[in-house]
C-alpha cells in the first residue's frame, strides 16, 4: 500500500511539473521578446528626451532625495560634454498592469530556473524530512521528493502572482529589483533592505507591502496542499519567514552578480 501511494504521488507531482513546463513554452518566450522591444522603445524615447530637454535648476531637497533611491536602472542627467552621470533624476519607466502580469508569468514559468529551484527544494526537503525516519527504496525517495517539489512550485507561483502582479498593481509598486551604485558591504545592506523597501510606480521609495502581503497570502493558501500536521499558524509563519529569508538571499545574489 505505501508503494502504491508513493507511486501515485510521484505521478501527480510529475503531471504538475510537466504541465507548468508546457505552459512556459508558449507565452513566456513571446513575453521576453516584448520586453526587449519595450526596452528598445524606452531607450529611443530617453535619447530624444536627453537631446531636447533643457537643463533646469533642481531644488537641493529634490536632488538630495533622488540620491537615496539607489536604482541603477534609473536614467541620469548628463553634462553638455556627455560625461558620466552624477545622480539619478528620472525614475525608470513604470510597468503597466499587463506588463506586471507578464513579469509574473516569466518569473514563474520561464525555464529552467523555476523548475530547477523546485526540484532542488524538493530533494532537500525530503532529505531533511523526519516523518518516516528512513526510506525503503530509491524510488520512494524520488517520489516523495517530487511531491515536495510540486508543493514548492505551487508556493512560488502563488507568491509571484500576488507579489509581482496582484498586490503590485493594487499598491502601484514596481516588483523589479534595482541594483544600487553602492560599494563594499553597503551593497549587502541595500540588498537586504529591499525586502522591506521597494520603488513605487512613480519612482519613490515605499514600504514593500506588495512583497510582504503577497508572501503572507501565499503561506496561508499553501495550507491547502500542505500535510495535515503542517496546517497550523506556526507552520504558516515558518513558511513565510523562510520565504522572506530566501528573498533577502536572492537580492544579495542579484546585487553582487546580476547584470547591469
Image (spheres, rainbow, N blue to C red):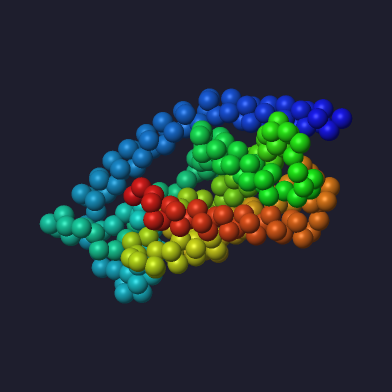
Q: Nearer the viewer, residue 43 or 113?
A: 113
- Image position of 219 (left or right of 169): right
State the image coordinates of residue 220 (x, y, percent, origin top left): 74, 52
Residue 158 in sight in this render: no
- Residue 166 versus residue 136 in the image, above or below: below
Q: Is residue 82 left or right of residue 135?
A: left
Residue 143 x, y percent position in the rendering: 71, 33
Image quarter where the N terminus lies is: top right
Instruction: Say above or below: 32 vs 95.
Output: above
The image quarter in which residue 189 lies: bottom left
Instruction: Report the number of discs.
Output: 0
In the image, is 103 to the left or to the right of 19? left
Residue 210 or 190: which is nearer the viewer?
Answer: 190
Considering every residue shown, the one lying at the far right of the view is 1
User: 63 or 126, which lies in front?
Assistant: 126
What x and y, as percent, mark residue 175? 51, 51
Query: Which residue is rendered at x = 12% and y = 57% of the image?
Result: 81
Q: Residue at x 57, y 36 (%)?
A: 115
Q: Residue at x 52, y 28 (%)?
A: 27
Task: List the single residue furthest toward the left.
Answer: 81
* Residue 72 visible at all: yes
Q: Position of residue 92 (x, y in %)?
A: 39, 52
Residue at image coords 84%, 47% = 228
Please tell me whether residue 239 is drawn above or below residue 19 in the rendered image.
below
To which quarter of the image does residue 225 belong?
A: top right
Amino acid at each position: 500500500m505505501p508503494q502504491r501511494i508513493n507511486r501515485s504521488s510521484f505521478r501527480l507531482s510529475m503531471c504538475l511539473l510537466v504541465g507548468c513546463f508546457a505552459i512556459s513554452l508558449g507565452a513566456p518566450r513571446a513575453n521576453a521578446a516584448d520586453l526587449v522591444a519595450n526596452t528598445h522603445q524606452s531607450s529611443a524615447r530617453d535619447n530624444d528626451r536627453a537631446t531636447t530637454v533643457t537643463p533646469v535648476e533642481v531644488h537641493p531637497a529634490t536632488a538630495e532625495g533622488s540620491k537615496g533611491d539607489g536604482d541603477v536602472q534609473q536614467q541620469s542627467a548628463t553634462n553638455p560634454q556627455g560625461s558620466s552621470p552624477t545622480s539619478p533624476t528620472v525614475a525608470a519607466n513604470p510597468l503597466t498592469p499587463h506588463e506586471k502580469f507578464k513579469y509574473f508569468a516569466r518569473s514563474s514559468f520561464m525555464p529552467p530556473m523555476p523548475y530547477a529551484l523546485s526540484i532542488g527544494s524538493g530533494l532537500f526537503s525530503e532529505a531533511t524530512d523526519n516523518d518516516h525516519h528512513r526510506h525503503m527504496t530509491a524510488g520512494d525517495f524520488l517520489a516523495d521528493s517530487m511531491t515536495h517539489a510540486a508543493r514548492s512550485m505551487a508556493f512560488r507561483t502563488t507568491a509571484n502572482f500576488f507579489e509581482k502582479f496582484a498586490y503590485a498593481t493594487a499598491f502601484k509598486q514596481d516588483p523589479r529589483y534595482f541594483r544600487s551604485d553602492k560599494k563594499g558591504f553597503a551593497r549587502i545592506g541595500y540588498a537586504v533592505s529591499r525586502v522591506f523597501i521597494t520603488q513605487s510606480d512613480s519612482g519613490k521609495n515605499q514600504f514593500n507591502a506588495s512583497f510582504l502581503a503577497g508572501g503572507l497570502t501565499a503561506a496561508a493558501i499553501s495550507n491547502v496542499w500542505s500535510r495535515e500536521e503542517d496546517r497550523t499558524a506556526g507552520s504558516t509563519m515558518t513558511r513565510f519567514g523562510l520565504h522572506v529569508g530566501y528573498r533577502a538571499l536572492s537580492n544579495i545574489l542579484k546585487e553582487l552578480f546580476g547584470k547591469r
